[in-house]
């Protein structure tokens, strides 16, 4: 059954007690008419060996000593975050990354608290060497996919893809509006930011090409790009190649605007903390047409927030302040949720 307040309150009372959910970056903790969520769930693996993937570290005999109990705790935690992040109602669409397979996605419902919520799932096994994928969960009453594709990223000099795909979904909303959604998890900074930058530039080019093809068919298309980009809003891949800029005084329909740019200036919170500094690797990027307040569905420049309740944070003993309560610290099991915080985007109906 869609949109139940009761489950949310039962969840808070039974598990977190008086924990308060904080939406950082928004003036008011008010839920929109349509809520999107993105969450890098940090290595959500099952504990079975897949001979086609490099997943040996997530076996009971592996360096992480992963097992069935830890897997169940992991998917249970993810489901609780989704419930809490919904506010009065559950999120309408949820982009996830660092998911190993469909079994893990199903486990979020089976072993978590979302079993009675009518989420549908879009996912397929990617060619990523480690076996991590992206996925989209959605409530079909308000989001009805009419076209889905998985865009493969093939690096220069290679013949086949060896990394996760970019998920594209075109959907009708419960109005007559159409929303074009991209779920991303761009190549990591492993080996160094500059050394790996070209891989993320290649990903940015792919998304840009798809967005341009959408505009050729529909000049006023509503585009929503979400994900862990492994680059920050000011980096070349996003700011120059993808062309996602800060919000300007004059909003243009076919311009892409990065709602995470405002968090860079703030600096007090981000979706990820590295060497004591908060940053926004996880971002929402929207077309100017989606910021048109005369349209049926729109967002404003303050529509994005970082979901940062107390239970997702812990004290940063090395630096200062707080940091995400993660599942692993290096290869050591830490028992938390993720090394990223979820991000939320609220859209409004006219």
Image (cartoon, rainbow, N blue to C red):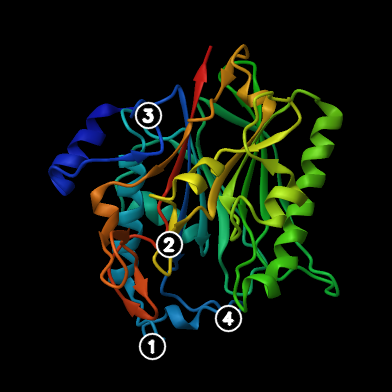
Label of residue 51 in the image: 4
Q: Identify the mark nearer the N-term, 3 or 4.
A: 3
Marks 1 and 3 close (CB-CB < 8 Å) = no
Q: Nearer the viewer, mark 3 or mark 4?
A: 3
Q: Identify the mark nearer the N-term, 1 or 4.
A: 4
Instruction: Residue 7: name its quadrant.
Output: top left
Q: Identify the mark nearer the N-term, 2 or 3.
A: 3
Q: Count the numbered circles shown.
A: 4
Q: Mark 1, residues whose alpha carbon is within 10 Å: few (<14), some, or many (≥20)?
A: few
Residue shown at 14%/40% (left/top)?
13
Circle 1 SS class: loop
Marks 2 and 3 close (CB-CB < 8 Å) = no
Q: Is residue 85 above or below residue 99?
A: above
Label of residue 277 in the image: 2
Q: Identify the mark nearer the N-term, 1 or 3.
A: 3
Return the x and y of residue 153 as percentages of the image width and height: 75, 61
Residue shown at 40%/86% (left/top)?
63
Return the x and y of residue 258 as percentages of the image width and height: 61, 40
Residue shown at 64%/69% (left/top)?
128
Circle 4 SS class: loop
Label of residue 27 in the image: 3
Left/right of residue 84 with respect to residue 196 in the rendered view: left
Q: Mark 4, residues whose alpha carbon is within 10 Å: few (<14), some, or many (≥20)?
A: few
Q: Nearer the viewer, residue 269 or 133?
A: 269
Return the x and y of residue 11 as percentages of the image width and height: 21, 41
Q: What is the distance, in whole Å, between disc 1 and disc 3 at their CAs?
A: 48 Å
Q: What is the distance, in whole Å, between disc 2 and disc 3 at their CAs?
A: 23 Å
Label of residue 61 in the image: 1
Q: Nearer the viewer, residue 261 or 344?
A: 261
Q: Nearer the viewer, mark 2 or mark 1?
A: 2
Q: What is the distance, in whole Å, between disc 3 and disc 4 at their CAs?
A: 49 Å
Q: Identify the mark nearer the N-term, 2 or 1.
A: 1
């Amino acid at each position: 059954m869609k949109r139940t307040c009761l489950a949310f309150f039962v969840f808070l009372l039974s598990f977190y007690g008086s924990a308060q959910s904080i939406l950082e970056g928004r003036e008011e903790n008010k839920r929109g008419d349509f809520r999107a969520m993105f969450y890098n769930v940090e290595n959500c693996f099952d504990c079975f060996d897949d001979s086609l993937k490099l997943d040996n570290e997530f076996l009971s005999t592996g360096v992480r000593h992963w097992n069935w109990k830890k897997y169940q705790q992991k998917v249970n935690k993810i489901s609780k975050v989704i419930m809490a992040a919904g506010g009065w109602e559950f999120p309408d669409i949820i982009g996830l990354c660092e998911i190993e397979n469909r079994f893990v996605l199903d486990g979020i419902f089976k072993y978590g608290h979302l079993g009675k919520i009518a989420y549908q799932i879009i996912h397929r096994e990617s060619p990523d060497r480690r076996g991590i994928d992206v996925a989209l969960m959605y409530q079909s009453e308000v989001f009805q996919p009419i076209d889905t594709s998985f865009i493969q990223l093939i690096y220069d000099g290679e013949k086949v893809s060896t990394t996760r795909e970019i998920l594209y979904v075109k959907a009708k909303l419960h109005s007559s509006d159409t929303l074009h959604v991209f779920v991303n998890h761009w190549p990591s900074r492993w080996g160094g930011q500059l050394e790996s930058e070209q891989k993320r530039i290649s990903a940015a080019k792919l998304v840009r090409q798809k967005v341009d093809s959408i505009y050729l068919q529909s000049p006023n298309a509503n585009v929503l790009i979400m994900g862990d980009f492994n680059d920050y809003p000011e980096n070349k891949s996003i700011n120059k190649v993808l062309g996602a800029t800060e919000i300007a005084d004059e909003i243009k329909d076919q311009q892409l605007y990065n709602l995470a740019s405002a968090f860079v200036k703030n600096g007090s919170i981000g979706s990820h903390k590295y060497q004591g500094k908060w940053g926004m690797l996880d971002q929402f990027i929207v077309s100017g047409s989606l910021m048109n307040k005369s349209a049926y569905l729109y967002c404003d420049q303050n529509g994005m927030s970082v979901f940062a309740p107390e239970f997702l944070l812990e004290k940063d003993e090395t630096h200062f302040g707080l940091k995400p309560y993660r599942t692993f610290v290096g290869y050591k099991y830490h028992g938390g949720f993720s090394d990223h915080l979820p991000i939320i985007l609220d859209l409004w109906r006219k």
